[in-house]
Image (cartoon, grey):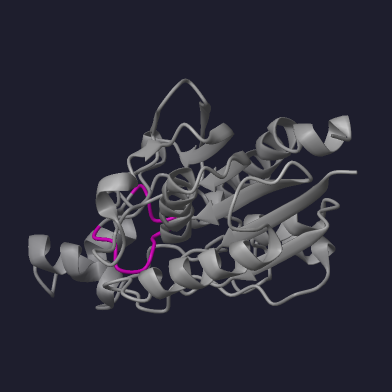
């Protein structure tokens, strides 16, 4: 009997400590609902699972290295330090956490340990505290990798880019979804919209139009009903409704592709 082992690393400032998988698809998408996609996937019948919250170093992602080290320590305990025929290893990650699991896969490749499947949600490499030269490519020891990414047309997190978009031997499948970066990972922004004011999301308007005119420009912005992510200069092209729809589609796609080994029973 094969034992299936799963480890997940979430995105920056994301902590899902729920034990109920039904909480993970909140239909209204209210911000703060426990909705992590990588957390949801733990409930698929794995023999051993481990969930690591994302780094809390929002700007630098500095603790990413420590999280990766701790994750490797758990893998050595739960799977082993060398290839084991009686176990199969699965990795999941979102955002910086997804970059972290790519680094993990490279470390495992150096040890000769295969990764059966990798579930990646909008991987971004925004930390200098990990092996950044490895995050671009899925290594050869990964049998299959699936990467759900935000569609560039969504206009979400324009400055982030993506990593994990290349593969070593055709072992990667990518799909794009009309939702925000948070939505791809199951952490929707909810009903946050562009609002007149002088918060971080309005600085671009103030800089472009001046403090007196900017609130009026915001009020007339055709994207005023679109989600405006914290710290971003301009709003996305995603409505709150579209975000939830895209979030659900990203998870449904991943479910349709993943767990082939579990489904086969081997």
> Which SS does the magenta portion mostly show?
loop
- Give the residue displayed 61% in from the left and 47% down from the top: 247
- Give the residue displayed 55% in from the left and 69% down from the top: 73
- Give the residue displayed 84% in from the left and 44% down from the top: 2
**Rendered location of residue 72, percent (x, y):** 52, 64
**Rendered location of residue 212, percent (x, y):** 13, 74
Quadrant of residue 143 in the image? top right
Position of 2 compared to 161: left or right? right
Magenta residues span 222-233
**Rendered location of residue 222, percent (x, y):** 35, 47
Position of 206 compared to 223: left or right? left
Is residue 27 visible in the rendered structure shown here? no
- The residue lying toward the viewer, choosing from 87 and 17, is 87
Q: In this view, does 201 lie above or below 91?
A: below
- The residue lying toward the viewer, choosing from 103 and 39, is 103
In magenta stretch: residue 227: yes
- The residue lying toward the viewer, choosing from 11 and 144, is 144
């Amino acid at each position: 009997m094969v034992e299936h082992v799963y480890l997940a690393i979430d995105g920056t400032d994301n902590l899902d400590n729920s034990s109920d998988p039904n909480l993970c698809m909140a239909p209204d998408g209210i911000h703060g609902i426990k909705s992590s996609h990588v957390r949801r996937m733990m409930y698929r019948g794995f023999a051993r699972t481990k969930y690591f919250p994302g780094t809390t170093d929002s700007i630098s992602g500095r603790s990413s290295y420590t999280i990766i080290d701790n994750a490797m320590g758990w893998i050595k305990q739960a799977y082993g330090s060398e290839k084991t025929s009686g176990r199969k290893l699965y990795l999941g990650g979102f955002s910086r956490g997804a970059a972290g699991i790519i680094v993990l896969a490279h470390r495992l490749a150096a040890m000769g340990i295969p990764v059966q499947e990798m579930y990646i949600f909008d991987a971004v490499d925004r930390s200098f505290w990990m092996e950044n030269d490895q995050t671009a490519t899925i290594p050869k020891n990964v049998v299959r990798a699936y990467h759900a990414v935000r569609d560039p047309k969504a206009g979400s997190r324009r400055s982030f880019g993506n990593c994990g978009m290349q593969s070593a031997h055709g072992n990667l499948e990518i799909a794009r979804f009309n939702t925000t970066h948070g939505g791809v990972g199951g952490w929707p922004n909810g009903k946050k919209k562009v609002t007149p004011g002088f918060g971080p999301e309005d600085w671009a308007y103030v800089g472009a139009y001046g403090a007196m005119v900017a609130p009026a420009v915001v009020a007339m912005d055709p994207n005023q009903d679109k989600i405006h992510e914290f710290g971003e200069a301009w709003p996305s092209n995603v409505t709150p409704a579209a975000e939830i729809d895209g979030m659900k589609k990203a998870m449904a796609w991943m479910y349709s592709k993943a767990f082939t080994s579990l489904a086969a029973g081997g």
